Amino acid sequence: MWIEGKVIERVDWSDKLFSLKIKVDIGDFIAGQFIKLSRVIDDKRIGRAYSLVNPPGTDYIEVLAVAVDDGQLSPNLQQLNIGDVIDVATKATGFMTLDELPQDEQKGNHLWFLATGTAVGPFVSIMDTPAPWQSYEKVILVYGVRYAEDLAYLEHLKQFQQTYPEQFKLVLSVTREPFEGAMDKRIPDAILTGELESRVGLTLNATDSQVMLCGNPEMITHAQQVLKELGLTKNLRRAPGQITVEKYW
């Protein structure tokens, strides 16, 4: 079931990367969930899922997307301007949420977000709520992209540093060009070499850490392998662990 939303703002981060803010009421959702957007193109309805960047409680939704050259929907979305309409699913869904993590003594004190590309979106949504800051002693976002222009919401992320200077750590990784202060390694490689832990000043371990992985499936697969070598296990409802994942395609 679809309802009509109206574009009220857009941001072009690069020639392919963009954000849309859409005025629509989808009801309650949990930070970290995704919503489906849809358009009828050549008499065929095309729908795709996009993570919500905005926190719960807003009267709009916000999505971060990249226009894929051969994509069925994303190039069309990139053409939307303020005032244009877009069909939006009536309900958000997804399990990349804090309430899916262990809530007891297995919770750990350090919450790690590992994201590539547009997958930073759900973590921005989560960090814009009080929950992570009230539940964890340390919150770490590791944000990997190819080029610096792909670092969407960078200024917003720096605001978290200002608001939670002792609690929040931002680690950037830009792999295809130099960028001041950033790593130049893929996230799994930075874990494997120890560079990530060194930059953060914390260790990834099964006692202290909860790790949420979102983004490129190759990154997720490799990172899970490395984390498991460090003693972390996948988080399941029937068997709580430390690794929670959501692949982006």
Image (cartoon, rainbow, N blue to C red):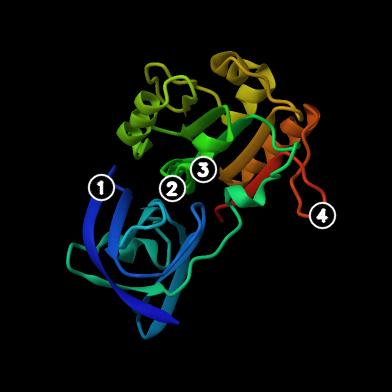
Q: Amino acid at mark 2?
A: Ser
Q: Amino acid at mark 1?
A: Asp
Residue 183 is situated, as x and y percent measured from the top left of the image, at 49, 20
Q: Please determine whether, in this image, residue 135 is positioned above or below residue 56.
A: above
Q: Please determine whether, in this image, residue 17 is positioned above or below residue 188.
A: below
Q: Residue furthest bottom?
A: 43
Q: Residues within 10 Å of mark 3 (few under 14, many from 20)?
A: few
Q: Which residue is mark 1?
A: 12
Secondary structure of residue under mark 2: helix
Q: Amino acid at mark 3?
A: Ala
* Badge 4 or badge 1: first in the primary sequence: 1
* Badge 2 or badge 1: first in the primary sequence: 1
Secondary structure of residue under mark 4: loop
Q: Is residue 215 left or right of residue 2?
A: right
Tell me the mark number nearer the camera, choosing from 2 and 1: 2
| Disc 2/disc 3 C-alpha distance (Å) | 11 Å
* Badge 3 or badge 4: first in the primary sequence: 3
Q: Residues within 10 Å of mark 2 (few under 14, many from 20)?
A: many
* Badge 4 or badge 2: first in the primary sequence: 2
Q: Which residue is mark 2?
A: 125
Q: Is residue 92 visible?
A: yes
Question: Which residue is at a point 76% across and 30% down the rendered structure image?
Answer: 206
| Disc 3/disc 4 C-alpha distance (Å) | 23 Å
Q: Amino acid at mark 4?
A: Arg
* Badge 2 or badge 3: first in the primary sequence: 2
Q: Residues within 10 Å of mark 4 (few under 14, many from 20)?
A: few
**Which numbered marker is on residue 131?**
3
Closer to the camera, 78 or 58?
A: 58
Q: Quadrant of the C terminus?
A: bottom right
| Disc 2/disc 1 C-alpha distance (Å) | 19 Å
Q: Which residue is mark 4?
A: 238
